[in-house]
Amino acid sequence: MTNHWIDIQHSDVIMCIGSNPAENHPVSFKYIDKAKDNGGKLISVDPRFTRTSAKADMYAQLRPGTDIAFLGGMINYVLNNDLIHKEYVVNYTNAAFLISDDFEFNEGLFSGFDKGSSSYSKESWAYQKDENGMILRDDNLKDPRCVYQLMKKHYSRYTPEKVCDITGTDLNNYLQLVKTFCSTGRPDKSATIMYAMGTTQHTVGTQNVRSYAMLQLLLGNVGIAGGGINALRGESNVQGSTDYAILYHILPGYLKVPTHTNTDLQAYLKKWTPTTDDPQSANWWGNTPKYMVSLLKAYWGEAATAENDFCYDYLPKRSGNYSYIKLMERLQLGGFEGLINMGTNPIVGGPDVQQIAKGLDKLKWMVSVDLWETETSVFWRRPGADPKTIDTEVFLLPAASSIEKEGSISNSGRWAQWRYQAIKPVGDAKSDAAMLDMWVKELKKLYAEDGVFPGPITDLAWDYGHEEEPDIDKVARECNGFFTRDTEVKGKRFKKGEQVPSFAYLKDDGSTVSGNWLYCGSYTEKGNMMKRRGLEDPGGMGAYHNWSWCWPVNRRILYNRASVDLDGKSFNQQKPVISWNRATRKWEGDVPDGGWPPMNEPGTKSPFIMIPEGYGRLFAAGLADGPFPEHYEPVESPVDNCMTAQQCNPAAMIPADFFSDSDKYPYVGSTYRVTEHWQAGAMTRNLPWLVELVPDMFVEIGTTLAKAKGLKNGDMATITSARGAIEARVLVTPRIKPLVVSGKTVEQVGMIWHFGFNGLAKGSSANVLTAAVGDANTGIPESKAFLCDIRKGGMKS
Amino acid sequence: MSRATISGEPDAFLIDLTKCTGCRGCMVACKQWNQLPAEETDFFSGEGYQNPKEMSENTYTVIKFREFEKNGHSIFSFYKEMCMHCDDPACVSVCPVNAFHKTPEGPVIYDAKVCIGCRFCMIGCPFDVPKYEWSKKLPLVRKCDGCYSRIKADLKPACVTACPSAMEYGPRSQMVQIAEERLKRHPDHYINTIYGKDEAGGTSVLYLSSEPYEELRFPSVPERPLPSYTWPALRLVPGIFATVVTGLTALTLFNHRKERLERERNKEKEAEQQRTVQAEEDKS
Ligand code: SF4
Ligand code: SF4
């Protein structure tokens, strides 16, 4: 989230698209309700009419996988009707920047596409610069090569009629909604976008989010109270695990994982430390060396010295794409000997799960660490498998639940909150930290005995006590970081062992340790900031700066220096996030995005400090699939792309042997969650009180499809896709309606993905049907739009 | 100190259905606090995702789902059904052994120790709230007790505590005031009625809704307190009373009941321990 949960109350318009907060983030509704009480409008955009739609002031239906068309039309509307927040757009975004003459867009492809590798070379997606490296700009936004004009041209193709033809949205509904949302370009108005997996699980997932960001930048809605683009994290600590490098391509604090070409620390830092020629750009990632060296010091402690590149050689280098789909492909090829699942249930949660399950058959050993016996932990018992032919040795380790252990948890709003142990773990259950601690200690012993390359393991700085439960306080202290010797930074003296007060004091000379620079400030000499429970709210804006701690540096709203005009005065006087006090020459309110004076004063910096050029990117050259989001059909779609001849995202991750058949599988399928169950279901399908509420795997279809297929409420039906077949009870509902797309009626089939063959409540897994095709940038599978068929009767009938 | 002694008047629930998302946290919280077993359900037993079908001996509160079309728009609505804790309750007036009583704090509570299982309360209640333990050999009557033990401990009811958005709890006049303010501020948003304000002579559960109450299948009840109808009526049917009492041998009834109550009390002790832990948590 750029903002945070409580801040949603300040929104004048809230658009839930690709999310369903009433069902999947029920507590957030408290703040949506507050906004509504204050006159705010709630818009729900969803293929189905959900419990969120039920509470919305406006509802618009859209076909799964067509967000970019939907948003493209909104961008077009804003530009055509000149509804942008002009002062913001000119001064804080790259709208005025001139783009290389070589950049072009033709028939669905941006310049630089290479068919052979299905990827772009991005040289032409570049800014025009003068001889000093300064970007050329036209503040009148008139130059045909400026971002504003290129964008205007690009989205002029997204007329309301065309958009609704693609998305299946009712034209009047669409126009009304667009008008409401786009009225928030006024400085005193705000709108927020709440999104989740309905946005991201597409082959254009990243560009979906980009399209939201662009619209919000145009309306001046990023950085302000009640604004932003807010990712609703689907699990209570997903934010924390992402911050701490759960993804294959990042290290803690979003530092890049080195690739095999980054042969030494210098090469790595040269490659991944962005530079700028603009003195007004803070270019915060320019600090990469300090953060990286402090991280290496956290990993290898005293062994990491300037002489040995701080043990950079010990870090594994990646030589390819290790995203989920790729790992699972390799699993199926027998590419792994062993697998450890910690709180994950891939044969329910992954895409095309039957293939993943077959991959597990090839393992020599597998460990599952979980609260319950998950489907994955008993994969050899799955329907259709013959245990006699499976040799995998399986270990199920009982894990402690969240209330049985202590530690921090980071919510969607980036607040790291300390949580205490309420009860001791039941039976033999242990915390993840305890298990990892035991493993590492054992590995250290084994590597010391006869390891081939023991250094990375034996030199690991691993000192969290000798108890069975590691000292989690020590872990938190190390994540924040401390000084390794007496030293002076920025005129301040620090003693060896002292906690680093904030990442501004981290160094690249080995004098500081920090396990995650973003969390530097979370545990200072004043104590564990994540334990704070102060209820003061001086500005009355719900920022609660003394409640827990928020990264970065306790800043509650990101990009907040874009919430003020050039003099530092809040665009919205009623709801200021920060404002510049001329007398004290200090910012007041939230922790500002850097303490530099306002834009009209010397010594200032541009507000988007994480971007090397310092401006919000309407044109983003960094992505794999184009600088502007463009509508492509999902990999499996019932219709042709009516925008261009390019059917799908040309850079998407699609296996060579992928096939699909829209005649055999004519309906648009999608998956989702309900309030009553949780993820792959182990935590809820085993609880009688929740099973009572939703006892069966079910599929939702509209009344017309039900009639055509002779299906009644409660009937058993079989749903098939090119990947496999499942069965489910049918819920016939007027809340799901067919869509008219390019003149063709398209029926929808919606299903929950919580079920599996094991546990108290059992049922088919919807992910049997989903395809292992992935987003061009992240590789996230396209679970939210695929093709399927449905027929009456169970699988045996 | 209980809440009523502070405010000097009974507390009430205000359930704003325009803010209810049908998340059913309240149902689970109720089961947890009261340690009620889950019911065995099959698919869904009503419109939408409704389960269980209705209140029962093991389910003191149910979210009733409705889904239909109106003026070309989808309506998906959620109505939390529970004991209404009437100001002048029919169950209290018809109970021949005074097992029910209206507490000064608001909740209408029930004493299993004196209940003889006559089921007059079930006939008398206009909201169909008290449920009989048909599954048990020596059944008692069961219903929501407004979390009286929590109220006594100065906590709010479990369902209110769990609810993210739709429920308020406090002195009845205050709840009425909040409800009236909402009606005034957003007249286009609500049906201009506070259900429960006058129904059955006034109840301690008040509702606001954007849809007409009949469409959500709220029972339609007169505004006069129900005892004024039920008791005179039931009194005229002495047969009922006679049958209930003579149909069972009083002695066996009481012996069995004693055993059962002993067992219940042991269970209750365990549950109480659990509650104390939770109560401490809720307070902190
Ligand atoms: S007041 Fe208590 S007993 Fe009654 S419905 Fe709520 S949680 Fe259940
Ligand atoms: S907890 Fe509140 S919002 Fe959720 S169903 Fe119950 S009354 Fe409605």
Image (cartoon, grey):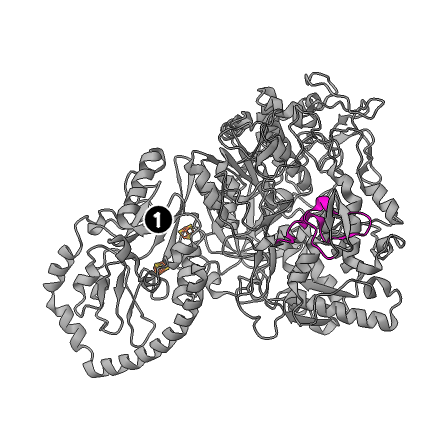
| A378 sits left or right of B227 in the view | right
**Which residue is painted at 85% across and 57% down in the image?**
A314
**Which residue is painted at 46% across and 56% down in the image?**
A714
Above or below residue A97? Residue A665 is below
Question: Which region is colored magenta?
Answer: A497-526
Membership of B116 in magenta stretch: no
Mark 1 neighbour class, 10 Å CA radius: few under 14, some 14 to 19, many 20 or more:
many
Above or below residue A612? Residue B61 is below
Would residue A657 be seen by someone viewing this image from the given angle?
no
Q: Is mark 1 within 8 Å of ligand 2?
A: yes
| B48 sits left or right of A447 in the view | left
| Image spot of residue A777 (x, y percent) | 73, 42
| Image spot of residue A260 (x, y percent) | 87, 50
* Three-letter code, disc 1: Ile
Secondary-structure class at tag 1: strand
**Which residue is painted at 27% across and 56% down in the image?**
B4
A36 and A116: which one is in front?
Answer: A36
Q: Please tell me whether the stretch drawn in magenta is mainly helix, strand or loop.
A: loop
Above or below residue A474? Residue A659 is above
Q: Which residue corresponds to mark 1?
A: B15
Membership of A524 in magenta stretch: yes
Determine the residue located farthest toward the left in the rendered image.
B236
Above or below residue A236? Residue A761 is below
| Image spot of residue A726 (x, y percent) | 60, 57
| Image spot of residue A632 (x, y percent) | 68, 35
